[in-house]
Amino acid sequence: MKHVNNIILVAVLLVGSTRSFSQENNGKILSIQDAFELAVKNSAQLKVSEINTDLAQQKVEIAKLGKLPQLSTGLSYGYLSNSQIWNPSFDKLGHKPIPHNLTQFSFQAAEVIFSGGELANNLKKAGLEEQIAVLNQEKNLQDVKFLVAAKYLDIYRLINQRQVYVDNIKLSQERLKNIISLQKQGIVTNNDILRTHLIISDLELAVRKTEDNITILNQQMNIVLGLDLNERLIPDSSLLTYSPKDEDIKKLMSEAFENNRELKTAAKEIEAAQTNLKLIGADRYPRVTLFAANNLQRPYTYSTPALDIYYNNWIAGVSMTYNISSIYQSPRTRKAGKIQVEQSLAKETVQKQNVEIAVNADLVKFNEAKYELDTYTEDLKSAEENFRIVEKKYFNQLALLADLIDATNTKIEAELKVSNARINVVFSHYQLKKSIGLL
């Protein structure tokens, strides 16, 4: 009966392992570049950025209209009452009949010929705001790409982790068969079978937990990519063929100062603040406008009695207006504008420092990830050789099962470290590219 139970136990474990292993083959293989393209196409965050850019572009078109003449027209038709006439002491009232049909048509055109640079600076400011919106959109694009890369690599990490567990389940099941054979021969006790069974159960539980985490990350990724929530994604294994090379910090820093979107945005904000300062200064100048107007009206009310006729007149000339309150308002608004420029300059300095810190830190992490991969790869070779020796000793009755369990755990841990280290190299590479602005 004991032998039958052992056979059933092995069969159940083999079925469970096969089911877990087969799950990773049910899904859609997706390259990281395809993931980027789907995110760019479907990301809700990027759609908001696109709308902001479109709005900024429309504001530029509106600012351009400021250079065109201002045209207005009006048409009135109504009832005109008789006129009331009072004497100087307002004690005697008289009435004079007036034609009651009032018709009036007017047309006016005006064009600003001088405003202290207000129109040109308004257009420049709108253009700078458009450029800032584009840079913000590009930054959001990089943020979304990095989010996708992080999720993508996390899924890959868990798939590799699950595979390590699955491979060790198969290895443990083969060992269990051998232990059962030794137990039949009376060489080992039933305790070794039970302990091996516990190892397999722990590994199966680890597979289950890893599978659940893969499902959660898949759903999070699908939301970003605009795919069905339950679609299973499998990362492209060719990603780990990336061969890291040594990076020069001076070259990286030069690329960062040239391509980092936040630095570019800070520079445009300085230009915008300086342009705003010029707009404030325009208020100190008079506004000169060319104008022309025409007026057609019926009846003619400037005679007594009023005449039921159409009369037309036109006017053309130059007008000049000056905001006298700017004499005491402009110095304060100008001071506020200068403070805004100083603030933008300080922000750019801080941003440069942040970029330097980020690039240096990410380069250190990148080199650390490469070193870890080399170290863990060597450790894995030692762990595999140690496991091979201890396993051989165990089946030759020269080592205890506890020694074999320790060797197995060491090998599993080493395999996981190597798998994670490979992915960390790729992740740190993307992190470095994001800091530079080339993701």
Image (spheres, grey):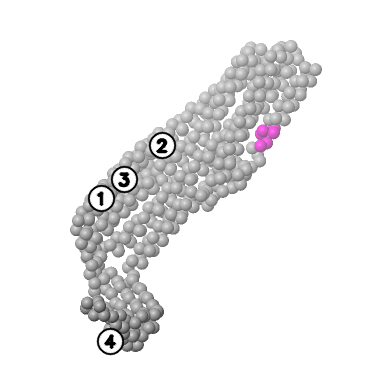
Q: Residue at x 29, y 87 (%)?
A: 305
- Quote the CA–CA distance across marks 2 and 3: 21 Å
The outermost residue toward the front is 91
368 or 233: nearer the viewer: 233
- Quote the CA–CA distance across marks 4 and 1: 59 Å
Residue 26 in view here:
yes
- Secondary structure found at label 4: loop
Q: Is residue 57 above or below residue 16?
A: below
Q: Residue 348, which numbered label? A: 3
78 or 260: nearer the viewer: 78
- Quote the CA–CA distance across marks 1 and 3: 19 Å
In this picture, residue 77 sits left or right of residue 373: left
Which amino acid type corresponds to the residue marked 2 in the rendered image? Asp
Please provide percent x and percent y for residue 314: 29, 81
In which quadrant is the N terminus drawn? Answer: top right
Which amino acid type corresponds to the residue marked 3 in the rendered image? Glu
In this picture, residue 3 sits left or right of residue 330: right
| Residue placed under numbered mark 4 in the picture | 304
- Secondary structure found at label 1: helix
Please provide percent x and percent y for residue 238: 56, 41
Residue 20 is one of the magenta-drawn residues: yes
First in sequence: mark 4 vs mark 1: 4
Q: Residue at x 66, y 21 (%)?
A: 198
| Residue placed under numbered mark 2 in the picture | 362
First in sequence: mark 3 vs mark 4: 4
| Residue placed under numbered mark 1 in the picture | 336
What span is colored magenta in the figure? 18-23
Mark toward the viewer: 1 or 3? 1
- Secondary structure found at label 3: helix
- Secondary structure found at label 2: helix
